[in-house]
Amino acid sequence: MNTKIYSVITGTGNYIPEKRMSNNDFLINEFYETNGEKINKSNQEIVDKFLEITTIEERRYITDNLKTSDIAFFAGVEAIKSANIDKEDLDYIIVANNFGDTLFNNRAVDHVPSLASKVKHKLEIKNPETIAYDITFGCPGWLQALIQADYFIKSGDAKKILVIGADVLSRISDPHDRDCMLYADGAGAVLLEAKESDTPIGILAHKTRSDTYSHAGLLFMGKSYNPDFEKKDDLFLKMNGRRLYQYALETVPQAIKACLDKADIHITKVNKVLIHQANGKMDDAILKRLYALYEIDDAPENIMPMTIAKLGNSSVATLPTMFDLLVKNKLNHHQIQKDDLLIFASVGAGMNINALVYKMT
């Protein structure tokens, strides 16, 4: 027998904010073009076109009294309870995020101390050997944190790692930019543990790429498109949506296939494809191109769970939230079982892309 150590998810959790923001809530906004000119269309036209392009109907925002570290903590508590472990046994707490603890009335990024340090403090963990740190890697941050955690476990450095993805994008989106309707808030978490097995289980393979030379500027921080915005120096999340869409279509399918090839797994063996939810139509196109790489015309029905229509784009929280809902049978028409093969993939600021193959236990 060839017994090896594998990284297995033993617990999951999420925090989905209660506050719903429908597309109609943006009818009161004043939208501007990138050049500072007011868009010459009615807000109803803008909102209707947005829905057609993205499939997003609503998104969730946190309440004013909460911060990113709070919702990261909520998701982490759920994952720890789900795994039924002693929190003092955690070797690492890794929190993927992009903007730290922004406040409802102050957009300044707060990364001191790290969100992971704040989460560890909120968990009241006394063990000094529970190492807490953050990772900033754009939307693929949570998946990259999971990849790092896998390295720690495979090296023998750790046995239990809490991996959280949390972001509050509502506080760094420009209310005068149509793209603000994409963004949402949320947190998701998993507990990753070292498990011995004679057969491959858990994380089987992963791949990451960073295309910074020609694509670093597709997502960036910039001033409001409204030239008369009250706080002139405030910075908001901006993106070149058209180029980002094309980049994702050209590169994400190849990255996923490279990961599956590394694991020596054919796409026809995969039970679910979990892709970061930034644009519903884009994900559909990515899936089609992925299967085309295998000379398959159409992807199987019900292969790709979708949460974006109701939850929007919550960045690093999207994948762990979707996975938590999936394993707890809270996604309509989607179930998973033992030995199912899942592929995770994400794309975002950097530009960064990653993918990971996982076998359910």
Image (cartoon, rainbow, N blue to C red):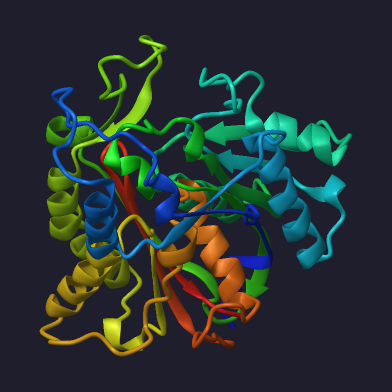
Q: Please tell me which residue lies in front, 300 or 193.
A: 300
Kindly tell me whether residue 148 is visible in this rendering: yes
- Describe residue 311's horizontal placement relative to residue 288 as left or right: right
Quadrant of the image occupied by residue 289: bottom left
Query: Residue 332 location in percent, x, y?
Result: 52, 83
Kindly tell me whether residue 132 is visible in this rendering: no
Compared to residue 46, the image places residue 310 above or below, namely below
Rendered residue at 40%/15% (across/down): 234
Quadrant of the image occupied by residue 64: top right
Q: Please tell me which residue lies in front, 270 or 242.
A: 242
- Image quadrant holding the N terminus, namely bottom right
Q: Please tell me which residue lies in front, 169 or 214.
A: 169
Compared to residue 236, the image places residue 135 above or below, namely below
- Describe residue 237's horizontal placement relative to residue 245 as left or right: right
Rendered residue at 31%/71% (across/down): 260
Query: Residue 93 location in percent, x, y?
Result: 68, 42
Quadrant of the image occupied by residue 83: bottom right
Query: Residue 88 location in percent, x, y?
Result: 86, 45
Q: Please tell me which residue lies in front, 109 or 204.
A: 109
Number of numbered discs overlaid on the protein picture: 0
- Describe residue 8's horizontal placement relative to residue 40 as left or right: right
Rendered residue at 62%/43% (across/down): 62
Compared to residue 79, the image places residue 100 above or below, namely above
Query: Residue 280 location in percent, x, y?
Result: 30, 65
- Image quadrant holding the C terminus, namely bottom right
- Describe residue 295's horizontal placement relative to residue 351 as left or right: left
